[in-house]
Structures are given as C-alpha cells and as structure tokens.
Image (cartoon, rainbow, N blue to C red):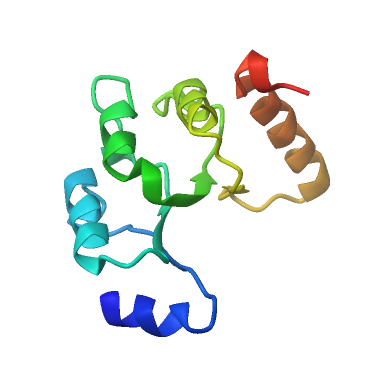
C-alpha cells in the first residue's frame, strides 16, 4: 500500500481503501493496514461494516481511522443495527466534507428510493449542521 500510495501521490491521486473480508474488516486490522501504508494519500472508505459496531456504538472503530476517512458507504438507513445518528455526529464533529455513498439494492424506481434515502439522511444529520 505504501508503494501504491507513493506512486499515486505523484499524480495527485488518493488511494481509498475499503475492507470487506472477514479479517481486514475488523477495525483494529484495518487501522493497522492504514498505519503500515504510512502514506498521507492512502485513506479510508468507511464501509459501515457490522464489525464496526460494539455495544450499539461505532465510536471505538471510528476513532481508530477517523483522521483517514475520505468516503463513507451507507447501507439501508432503516437498519437499526448501525447507529447512523451517532456515525453522522462523529463525521460532523470532525467537519467531514467527503461523500456519503448509498450502497443499497437496486430498485424499479431508483429516483423515488434515492429521495427517501436523502430524506432519511437529512433526518440523521446533527441539527446544528442542518441547512
């Protein structure tokens, strides 16, 4: 990762690492990967993995990679197993300005689904940051 990051830096490219495997998705392992990469443009895509949640909170996992998060994948916002309100508050607290991406199943009416997704996203934003 370090070599890839260094090479990409010369082109102004960020390497956004996202984890899915059973081992790499463990927050401590993902943090270690980013630490070993030791390159400022090797950054994280927060994937909202179930392994990020401990006792109903993502705070511990988030703290391990917070400074490296440059993109966020959100799954179904109605899924109560992910504390979305807390995640949004943590992102807001560090003035996150990156993208949040809807990683959701396809739909026969995607525009309608995305309008619902956006409405729920807006509802989860901390009130002090709402426009």
Q: Position of residue 26 (x, y in %)?
A: 21, 47
Report the residue at 42% width, 29% height from top. 82
Q: Specify the quadrant of the image occupied by residue 119.
A: top right
Horizontal side of residue 42 vs 79, given as left or right: left
- In front: 22, or 35? 35
Q: Position of residue 112 (x, y in %)?
A: 81, 40
Q: Quick one: quadrant of the C terminus?
A: top right
Q: Is residue 71 visible?
A: yes
Horizontal side of residue 15 vs 119, given as left or right: left
- In front: 107, or 7? 7
Report the residue at 59% width, 48% height from top. 98
Report the residue at 82% width, 46% height from top. 111
Horizontal side of residue 106 vs 3, given as left or right: right
Q: Position of residue 27 (x, y in %)?
A: 23, 45
Q: Is residue 10 above or below residue 54?
A: below
Q: Quick one: quadrant of the N terminus?
A: bottom left
- In front: 7, or 126? 7
Q: Specify the quadrant of the image occupied by residue 80.
A: top left
**Circle count:** 0
């Amino acid at each position: 990762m370090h070599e890839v990051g260094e090479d990409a830096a010369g082109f102004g490219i960020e390497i956004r690492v996202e984890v899915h495997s059973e081992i790499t998705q463990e927050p401590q392992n993902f943090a270690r990967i980013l630490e070993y990469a030791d390159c400022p443009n090797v950054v994280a895509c927060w994937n909202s993995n179930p392994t990020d949640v401990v006792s109903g909170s993502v705070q511990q996992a988030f703290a391990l990679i917070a400074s490296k998060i440059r993109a966020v994948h959100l799954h179904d916002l109605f899924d109560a197993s992910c504390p979305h309100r807390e995640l949004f508050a943590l992102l807001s607290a560090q003035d996150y300005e990156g993208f949040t991406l809807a990683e959701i199943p396809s739909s026969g009416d995607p525009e309608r689904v995305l309008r619902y997704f956006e409405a729920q996203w807006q509802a989860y934003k901390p009130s002090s940051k709402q426009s």
